[in-house]
Structure formats: C-alpha cells, structure tokens
C-alpha cells in the first residue's frame, strides 16, 4: 500500500487506483487523471471533491467522490488526533453506520495512521445535496427531515449498553466522570466571554457561568437508557436534498440520551423565534418517529429529556471556539450558536437539572 495521503494535494491517481481496486469498485479499467476542488467550512478536517477520468471498464467506479483529510492546521490536527476525533469517525463508518437506518454516505475506503493523526475517507458525492448554514436558521422542512434521521439513529442503539464500552464512542461516566471537560470549560469560559460576551445578555452569561461550574454534573447525571448520538448534529453537518437529509462528520460520536441530537439541532440550528414556535410539535413528531422505530417514550419523559439536553450544545460551542483561531465567518457562527443554545436553556428552564 502506498503512503497514506494526508491532504488534498497528496492524493494521487495511483493511490486511488489501488484503493478502489481493493474495495472491488474498479476492475478492468484505471484512473488516468484526477482534479479536485476544496469544499465545506469544517475546522477539524479538510474536504475535497475529486473528478476522476478513466480508461477501460469502470462501470462500478464513481466519476466523482469526496475525500476527507485531517486539518491542514498542525495544532488542530494534533489536538483532534489526541482526542480521537479522526479515529472515532473512521470506526463509526466501519462498525456502526450499517446498524442504523439513518442516512449516511457510502464509504468507498477508509484508512488511518497508527498515531491517529492522519486519515483519509473516500465517500460518495451527494451533490446536488447541500449542507445547511449555522448563519441562516434552518427551515421547518429541514428541521423535520433532520429530526427524522436523528430518531433513526437514536432508536437503532437505544438501551444497548455495550455501545459505551467502545473506545471510539465517548462516554463521560466511563472516561473520567466529566473531570477533563469540566477543567477545559473552567479554563476556556472567561476567554470565551471576552471574545463573544458583547453579543450575549447578562442572563445568558449568568447561565453559562452556572453551567461551567456544574458541567461535570450535567454530563454524568442522566441515568435513563442511553443510545448512540452524533454529538454535533447541526445543519452544517447535514446534506439536504428535496426530501432527504444525509449526516456526515462523525468525529464526536458519544453515548447519551435519545433526545440529545434533537435538542442540539433545534437549539443551535433554528432561529430562536422559530424554535419557540415549532419545538413542541417537532418533538411530538420526533417521539412518533421513535415509536415507529420501536422505542416508546411518554410525552412527558420525552419533553423532560429535551429540556435537559438543551445544555448539550454549550460545551461543544465554547470549546470549539476556544480551540479555533479567530476568523470572521467562524466567529459569526460560534456567536449565533451560543446565543441560540443559551437562550434555549433559559427558555426551557434547563437549570432545573443543575445543582
């Protein structure tokens, strides 16, 4: 096997020929030329769309594909590798994606280095489906599509305790009782407020401070049946078609409540006023999707977990911004997200679940 390519410019036609033949997609023909364009706005990794030119038979091989690589930024790459982000995603596609009816891209090949800081994923090109934008609140139709997919994932692994024992699925109670996340939040929150506090109300800042003091309690207190969740289930990690939603970027898979992804999506990807108007009916519909998939929750229990896991978005947003260099678009995104997530917690009285 040739050297693992770790950036878009290092991927060659020769390497693609080898891996597509190994995967059974390329038989008699071969790739003679490739070209690529960078796509997406991710910070933890780089994505590129490749166009492939062949000679000979290639009926099963794709004419275009998406390749995902580690971040070009060496600091981000090192942190992501150390936290297991790249390993988590590769292992999700290898071992868990097939176990759910949730729509995910077809993976042609996946490779990762022994130190887990370099990887490459080759996946189907879902164009013309497009990702959402955190800067623009999602539509009601997109919210319905997203929650349908989230329910399929939640139901597939609901109550399966062995999920939390896998080393590529984050589980705070297993790992350290939330101590590391607590320390990171206490370290990061003051600088986060310095950077984004101008856009937050005093009530929101006060809730953020309370959460920061108690986040280890939040991540370990839930004792009900758990399931596999995406963990960063937001509009920019979902490719929307006319009536489809395909979820990508599986670097934060974790064990949590069946309402975690639904609460995170509505709290961070929908404008506040729309979320307030839609959330009751959307969560009712989400509960019906769970029922259709074989998981029964009462309306009261479903709403209680939705309220509690409104807080899921706080740590992800604060730490995501704190470990990312300031840039105009990403700063706009993080500000929009924290405004929505904190107001979500306040509107739903999520503080009831904190000491």
Image (cartoon, grey):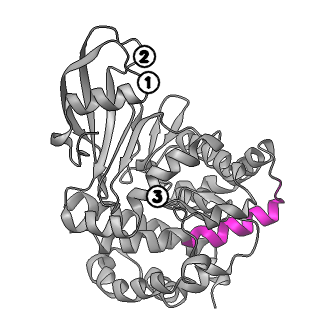
Q: What residue did someone put label 3 on?
A: 88
Asked if one can make out residue 128 in the rendered structure from this viewpoint, the answer is no
Q: Is residue 120 above or below residue 240?
A: below
Q: What residue did someone put label 1 on?
A: 24
Element under label 1? loop
Dot 3, how many residues are within 10 Å of its Cα: few (below 14), some (14-19), or many (20+)? many
Q: Which residues are magenta?
A: 296-311
Element under label 3? helix
Reply yes or no: does residue 80 show up in magenta. no
Q: Position of residue 102 (x, y in %)?
A: 61, 41
Residue occupying the point 54% across, 69% down: 312
Dot 1, how many residues are within 10 Å of its Cα: few (below 14), some (14-19), or many (20+)? few
Reply yes or no: does residue 302 show up in magenta. yes
Q: Nearer the viewer, mark 2 or mark 1?
A: 1
Residue occupying the point 37% across, 74% down: 319
Q: What whole-number distance in Å separates the C-alpha atoms at marks 3 and 1?
A: 25 Å
- Quadrant of the drawing holding the C terminus: bottom right
Q: Is residue 176 above or below residue 340?
A: below
Q: What residue did someone put label 2 on?
A: 60
């Amino acid at each position: 096997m040739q050297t693992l390519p770790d950036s878009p410019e290092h991927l060659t036609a020769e390497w693609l020929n080898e891996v597509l033949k190994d995967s059974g997609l390329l038989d008699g023909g071969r790739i003679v030329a490739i070209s690529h364009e960078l796509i997406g706005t991710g910070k933890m990794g780089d994505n590129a769309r490749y166009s492939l030119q062949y000679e000979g038979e290639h009926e099963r091989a794709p004419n275009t594909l998406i390749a995902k690589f580690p971040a070009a930024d060496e600091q981000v790459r090192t942190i992501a590798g150390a936290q297991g982000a790249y390993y988590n995603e590769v292992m999700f596609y290898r071992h868990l994606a097939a176990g759910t009816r949730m729509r995910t891209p077809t993976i042609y090949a996946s490779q990762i280095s022994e130190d887990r800081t370099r990887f490459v994923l080759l996946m189907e090109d879902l164009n013309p489906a497009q990702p959402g934008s955190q800067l623009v609140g999602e539509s009601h139709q997109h919210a319905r599509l997203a929650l349908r997919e989230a329910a399929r994932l939640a139901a597939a692994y609901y109550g399966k305790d062995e999920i939390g024992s896998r080393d590529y699925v984050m589980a705070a109670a297993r790992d350290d009782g939330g101590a590391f996340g607590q320390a990171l939040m206490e370290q990061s929150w003051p600088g986060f407020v310095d950077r984004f506090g101008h856009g937050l109300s005093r009530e929101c800042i006060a809730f953020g401070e309370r959460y920061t003091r108690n986040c280890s309690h939040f991540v370990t207190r839930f004792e009900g049946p758990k399931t596999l969740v995406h963990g960063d289930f937001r509009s920019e990690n979902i490719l929307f078609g006319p009536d489809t939603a395909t979820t990508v970027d599986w670097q934060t898979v974790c064990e949590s409540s069946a309402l975690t992804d639904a609460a995170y999506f509505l709290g961070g990807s929908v404008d506040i006023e729309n979320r307030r108007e839609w959330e009751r009916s959307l969560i009712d519909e989400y509960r019906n999707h769970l029922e259709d998939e074989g998981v029964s929750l009462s309306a009261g229990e479903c709403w209680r977990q939705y309220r509690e896991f409104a807080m899921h978005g706080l740590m992800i947003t604060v730490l995501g911004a704190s470990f990312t260099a300031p840039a105009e678009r990403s700063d706009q995104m993080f500000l929009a997200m924290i405004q929505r997530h904190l107001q979500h917690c306040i509107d739903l009285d999520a503080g009831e679940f904190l000491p």
